[in-house]
Amino acid sequence: MLRDTLILGIDLFARSVEPVVPAKEISQLKISEAASEPTTAKARRRIDVVAEYEKTQEQRNALNLVVVGHVDAGKSTLMGHLLYALGQVNERTLRKFEREAEKIGKGSFAYAWVLDETDEERARGVTMDIATSSFETAHRRFTLLDAPGHRDFVPNMISGASRADVAVLVVDASTGGFESGFDGDGQTREHAQLIRALGVRQVVVAVNKLDMVQWNADRYTEIVGRLQTFMQGCGFLRDNVRFVPVSGLGGVNLAQRASDVAELAWYRDGDSPGACLVELLDTFEQPQRAVAGAFRLAVTDFFRGGTAGSAGSVSASGRIAQGNVQVGDTITVVPGGASGVVRAIDVGFEAQDWAVAGDEVVIQVQGLDMQQLALGAVLCAPEQPITAVTCFEAQIAVFDPAVPITNGFPALVHVQSVSVPGSVRRIIETFDAHTGEIKRRNPRHIRKGATARVEIVTEAALCLELFKDAKDLGRIMLRRGGETVAAGIVTALK
């Protein structure tokens, strides 16, 4: 139903200057003569990837986890401490971070430095780009995507969340902390709305810094109550949003149940202490993967060379949105049409012969040149290339724009990790999201809470699919003046 694909009744307002995600003019990509003929890879036996996947489907346990929330909610500290508790960070490294953080007067940021790696992030104490790591629980292997919480870096947050299967939403339980993130211009609301619009259905809400209010049960209950109602309004099912009290800095209730914290005695699971964060993450369900569809990988990064040698090859990273790929396959870049042969595949930092939808991969391709790749380009099967367009129709849910959306309304159009300038060329109709009944044709404007079908044009070509054919590449966001004004799904390509 339309309710499952659109986000309704959203109150969103964030004021900041919008940075455009750096991207080449992907519509201008050209094939260089030197790399137009891919080198033929050594003949190898073809693998029936779909059959192999079906054999191992029950054992496959990889998930992409994005961590979101308002700036200063303690996301990086919490996840850095979790990685340390799980043995992903050794004692020597942590002590080094503590000494260096003390030197610049930020001693409490040592755990955050596990993920905040750049000098600028450490000096400012703010995550600015997506930080990536990995960890394992008893039944799951996670690729961790730590998203920035500051409103200036929402485009980077969108880039990371577009690659996620599941999410942790971190909120600050300290006095006034939750309110600053949830009310007014806080990013708690916007981040929750954005991850749902990007297809995330399962969330654990980490109620952080609860130790700063002496693990007060009433404070926890108040936060849970407000967020449960709001998350359901965003389109999350009640059973898919779970809550856990934690202290990221103190490391309480992260990897082990808090059996020794007397003030947390009210948090129970029968006769035992309540579940810790890792236990909740371990119960995330695997989403359905479009393994048999046409191969699609939206490029989030690329560089020269790779693990199998650098001569005449480039590597591209991203999450496979659809289909499968194996070593020896020929792939095509859209836009541009350049082709190359897959020489090596890394899945979750391990070399593999094949990969499928949902896998976070680095693919080394022989026969491509760096100039033939760009952020937002899509690697695809040559016999079934994706379409690059500058005009399309979409069904959108309007959040809370500062001014009504009218014909000609300018906005940045976000798809996966790229954004390009565009505009709403025409408002075709508004409709009831519950019934699909058309309310008005050719309206003059659309306001907060409306659902509408619109025609959008962009200044550069975007690689898009119809939402019904490929969900990950059929979702869009519209942002203007630092606020997300609408989200929607692609219904027609022109």
Image (tube, rainbow, N blue to C red):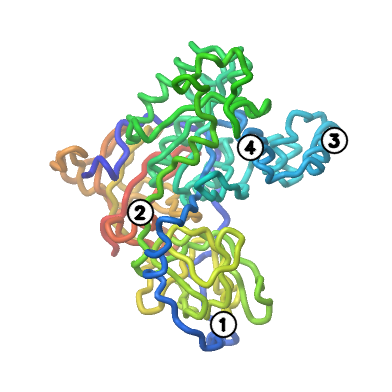
Q: Element under label 1? A: loop
Q: Closer to us: mark 3 or mark 4?
A: 4
Give me the C-alpha separation between circle 3 and circle 4. Answer: 20 Å
Q: What's the mark number on residue 288?
A: 2
In primary-sequence order, the first of circles 2 and 1 is 1
Q: Position of residue 39 (x, y in %)?
A: 56, 87
**Crowding at mark 2 (Cα within 10 Å: few <14, some 14-19, many 20+):** few
In primary-sequence order, the first of circles 3 and 2 is 3
| Tag 3: amino acid | Arg
Which residue is label 1 attached to?
A: 32
Give me the C-alpha separation between circle 3 and circle 2. Answer: 45 Å
Q: Closer to us: mark 4 or mark 1?
A: 4
- Hey, which quadrant is residue 123 in on the image? top right
- Hey, which quadrant is residue 300 in on the image? bottom right
Which residue is label 4 attached to?
A: 82
Q: What's the mark number on residue 358?
A: none
The correct choice, above or below, for 463 with respect to 115 in the image is below
Q: Position of residue 459 (x, y in %)?
A: 43, 60
